[in-house]
Image (tube, grey):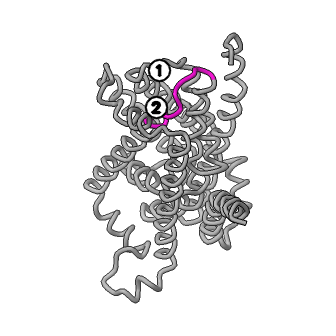
Amino acid sequence: MNFVRIKYKKIISKALQIVFPIVLGGIILVYMYQGFNFDRVWEVLKDDMNYWWMFLSLVFGVLSHVFRGMRWKLTLAPLNEYPKTSNCVNSIFISYAANLVIPRVGEISRCGVLAKYDNVSFAKSLGTVVTERLIDTLCVVIITAVAVLMQTNIFLTFFTKTGTKSDVIESILSSSNFYITLACIVAIFVLFYFLVKNVAMFAKIKGIISNIWLGIISLKDVKNINLFILYTVAIWASYFFQFYLSFFCFDFSSNLSIMAGLVMFAVGSIAVVVPTPNGAGPWHFAVITMMVLYGVGKEDSGIFALLVHGIQTFLLILLGIYGLVALPLTNKNKKL
């Protein structure tokens, strides 16, 4: 009976990790797009979108993953792990596509790819991924701090609009936007719980805690720290330009300033932490709310978020398929 109960709990846990993010993202999307005229989306897509600007923005999207793969290889070297650059990059492609199915499972899958094709220690590579996420968090904090300092009034208005800043508790509790924000915060804690639980359980089973720790502290032994910093700047600059250049795809957003782009990018970067497929729902909520504050109509803001997010998600799917196809072809001479 205990075995059946444990197995039942595992099934429920896995189901929650898949269903909960989809349901949460779906609820927020339904709320944001209730009464929305979807016919206009197709009209803009067919006649009013500049595909050259979109193509250029997607180039930066690809570059961000390439730079991330190259940076990952750099952090593995101190651990005496030397995977092929192409394998690192393709594993990144696959990981972001995998995250569309189960948020954050990509961090595990890319370590598995290098273990399979380059015999890289799974535990050590997982440790470097933990360090990488800490660095990413620091970058988001810095970007957000710069954006807040330079656009303080906009952020104060944003907090008020989303129900997270008010002098009267009653008005906070009556704001539907506040409950979306609260749900996103709760979801982040749920994600953190599952991540810690899964990694801890895996480490316990495999007895690899010490190797994970070696991966985490590998950054201190990176030989070319300047190159690591350069890759990090390149990753986040690519992320930013992928987002900012999408403004020029549409007439209604082409006049937005680069500072507006920085603010929306910062808010969007925080939103994608919420465990939904590619941030779907929370990202739309954050970007639409902020874009309206910059004078773009709500319907146009909805079109922007829907098309930009949809096209970027499609890119992740294509890159994931490419990575799956390319890996066996570029490693066919290896004995697996």
Would you identify the image quadrant in which residue 233 lies?
Answer: top left
**Relative vertical location of residue 130 with respect to residue 198 in this rendering, above or below:** above
Residue displayed at 29% across by 64% down: 153
Residue 235 drawn above or below residue 301: above
| Residue ID at (45%, 61%) | 290
Amino acid bearing label 1: Glu
Closest to the observer, 134 or 281: 134
Look at the magenta stretch and give its main secondary structure. Answer: helix
Q: How many marks?
A: 2
Query: Farthest residue in the bottom direction?
Result: 170
Residue sitting nearer the eye, 167 or 207: 207
Task: Give whichever of 319, 56 is nearer the camera.
Answer: 319
For the residues labelled 2 and 1, the Cα–Cα distance comes to 9 Å
User: Element at badge 2?
Assistant: helix
Q: Which mark is residue 81?
A: 1
Q: Do the CB atoms of the residues marked 2 and 1 lie less than 8 Å apart?
A: yes
Residue 293 percent across, percent down from the top left: 43, 65
Q: Which mark is residue 271?
A: none
Task: Judge whether residue 122 is colored magenta.
Answer: yes
Residue for badge 2: 124
Return the residue found at the far left: 149
Mark 2 residue type: Lys
Which callout, 2 or 1, points at the residue further toward the start of the chain?
A: 1
- Mark 2 neighbour density, 10 Å: few (under 14) some (14–19) many (20 or more): many
Asked whether residue 209 is drawn in magenta, I would say no
Q: Dividing the picture into quarters, in which one does residue 301 lie?
A: bottom right
Camera-nearest residue between 232 and 31: 232
